[in-house]
Amino acid sequence: MMAAGLAAGCTSDSARTDRKAATAAATPTPVAATGRHQAGITLPQPAQRNLLAVAADLDATAAPGPLLAELGRAILTLTTGTDPRLMGLPPGDLTVTVGVGPRLVRTAGASLPGAADLPTFSRERIAPGARGGDLLIQICADDALLLPVVAAALLHQAGDRIQERWRQSARRGTNVPIGDGLTAPRNPLGFIDGIVGPHTTAEQQRDLWLAGPPAVAGGTLAVVRRMELDLPRFAALSVAEQEAVFGRRRASGVPLSGGDVASGPELGAKTPDGRYLVPADAHVRRAHAAVVGAGLMLRRSYSTDEPAPGLLFISFQNDLRTFTATLTHMDTADALLQFTTTTASATFLILPGFDRQRPLGSQLFT
């Protein structure tokens, strides 16, 4: 009996140690909400598993400055876990990223970055209420339970000063290493998504962050597009045909021209009989920054299952032309687009970072 009791005691201690280790490993690292840039863009890396994007309109009588400052203060209490509206939920790696739409930007300056509306493109089926918007609230966390709770708190904070246009919840696929300590998720079509982007500090200074004017310095421009995917038709293709659509190997992400997952495709490489190894209409060729003649965009793509199976595409760049020129070039011949239909679309100026002394939006709105 004594031996059994000792054994049971040891097992209990071991189990407690294992539980503590598992809990520590499962606890996400907090992400600071303050700084030169808002969280939820380059940080954390990799991005959290779950996202909720809410697009809303500002009431004509409401001033954007005070509202944004209030939202910023609420974000600080929510991300630090001191807001009772969390109802005891630990915030973990919660981030909230706020942007303003072109109409509001134009009230601060018609020539400012972010003042231009996003044009229409082919393969769109967008209801009026799912295009554009004055305000973007992007909420991300590993814990999916946090997202609606945080959204409810922020929308209650805004009250009748805003009216929600549309929202979309989504989640990230399994992360795959792509070199240099970076990872990228698989998309619903099975391919690694977001391999190419401004990953280094120099690339981000060049293509991601706005350097000026002072009212927007430290911010960036976001494009948000919700797309339905024709999964059955894509799944009916052979693996080789699917790879020809993307220009990469499905399993590894390696370009069809060879190399490794992080290496750029050799767009001039051909087979002995003169065919391009990366087909002329492959997505990786049609969207290639050098081919388009535009900068790199940082992408955070998420899969959706409501209102239909698809993808929530979010790109960040410091020049809207990076996105518009890329999609215009894709529109003419990209093999991937035949499997997509865009059902929501908007662009927003993601405001510069903030802190307690420098309220959210204070650089742009007084």
Image (tube, grey):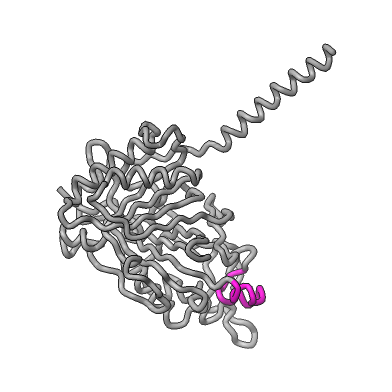
Question: Residue 86 in magenta?
Answer: no
Determine which quarter of the picture holds residue 344. bottom left
The answer to whether residue 82 is above or below residue 275 is above
Q: Position of residue 156 (x, y in %)?
A: 30, 44
Question: Residue 240 in magenta?
Answer: yes
Q: Position of residue 221 (x, y in %)?
A: 31, 60
Q: Position of residue 178 (x, y in %)?
A: 56, 57
Q: Residue drawn at (54%, 50%), measured in percent from left and top?
A: 181
Q: Is residue 362 left or right of residue 9?
A: left
- Outermost residue on the bottom side: it is 273
Q: Residue drawn at (32%, 60%), measured in percent from left and top?
A: 165
- Outermost residue on the top side: it is 2
Q: Position of residue 22 (x, y in %)?
A: 62, 34
Q: Which residues are magenta?
A: 232-249
Task: Please indicate, yes or no, whether residue 39 appears anywhere in the rendered image.
Answer: yes
Question: 334 and 226: which one is in front?
Answer: 226
Task: Please indicate, yes or no, whether residue 210 appears anywhere in the rendered image.
Answer: no
Determine which quarter of the picture holds residue 119. bottom left
Q: Residue drawn at (24%, 50%), measured in percent from left and top?
A: 160
* Count of numbered tags: 0
| Magenta span dominant secondary structure | helix
Question: 123 and 243: which one is in front?
Answer: 123
